[in-house]
Amino acid sequence: MYCRLAADSIFVTLESDGLYKCDEYIVALNGAIKNTAQEILIIQEYIQQWDDGEYRQGVRNTLRDRIFRLQSMKDDIIQARHRFNQSLFEKVSQALQIEMQRTTTRIEYEQDILRTYTGNQQVIQDRAARIVEQLTIIQQIKETEKFETLIPLFSRYLYLKRLLEWQLES
């Protein structure tokens, strides 16, 4: 995922178009937070050693504010990325639901045909087993709530769909 940062918004997309990956921004912000924290530690040592503590406390407070801003930017990127993932997941799920409904209808039709088919029983059993597996995967896809689960299930679904189509052709 790629991010475009603006003063008051974060735009997340799958297209790179000269943008940086969101993870790269997070790594850079983590580095900036770490460096600023180290600067605060150095300033704190100076505050304890020297009499001009009032000036250095102002510098320390400015650095502390910078850490809060950097952390806020990082949190905003993480939240924007999460919202993008949720939105994308919902859209993909909706598209898959339509495909799954078509496939379920086709499979039900095929099961009716297989019941009346009197040819090679091993072919019928193999095809029926794949159809049952595909229906199981369709149900799992309908119930999934995470991309990490959806992608392997959908890959298996596509494999079975192609396999069943290939068996029809041969």
Image (cartoon, rainbow, N blue to C red):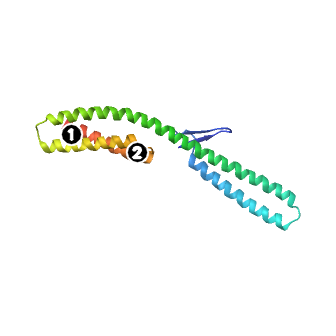
- Percent of width and height locating residue 123: 16, 43
Q: Is residue 107 above or below residue 145?
A: above
Residue carrying label 1: 167
Image point (23%, 39%), residue name: 166
Q: Give the left or right position of residue 22, taking residue 153 as reference.
A: right
Residue at horizontal 46 percent and vertical 35 percent from the top: 91
At which x and y percent is residue 142? 38, 40
Where's residue 107, x and y in %? Answer: 26, 35
- Which one is in front, 147 or 20? 147
Amino acid type shown at disc 1 = Gln
Seen from this angle, which residue lies furthest bottom?
49
Q: Residue at x 67, y 58 (%)?
A: 34
Side of 161 relative to 83 (left or right): left
Name, please, the residue furthest toward the right.
Answer: 51
Residue 14 visible to the viewer: no
Is 104 on the left or on the right of 57, as rendered?
left
Which tag is nearer the camera, tag 2 or tag 1?
2
SS category of the residue bearing label 1 = helix
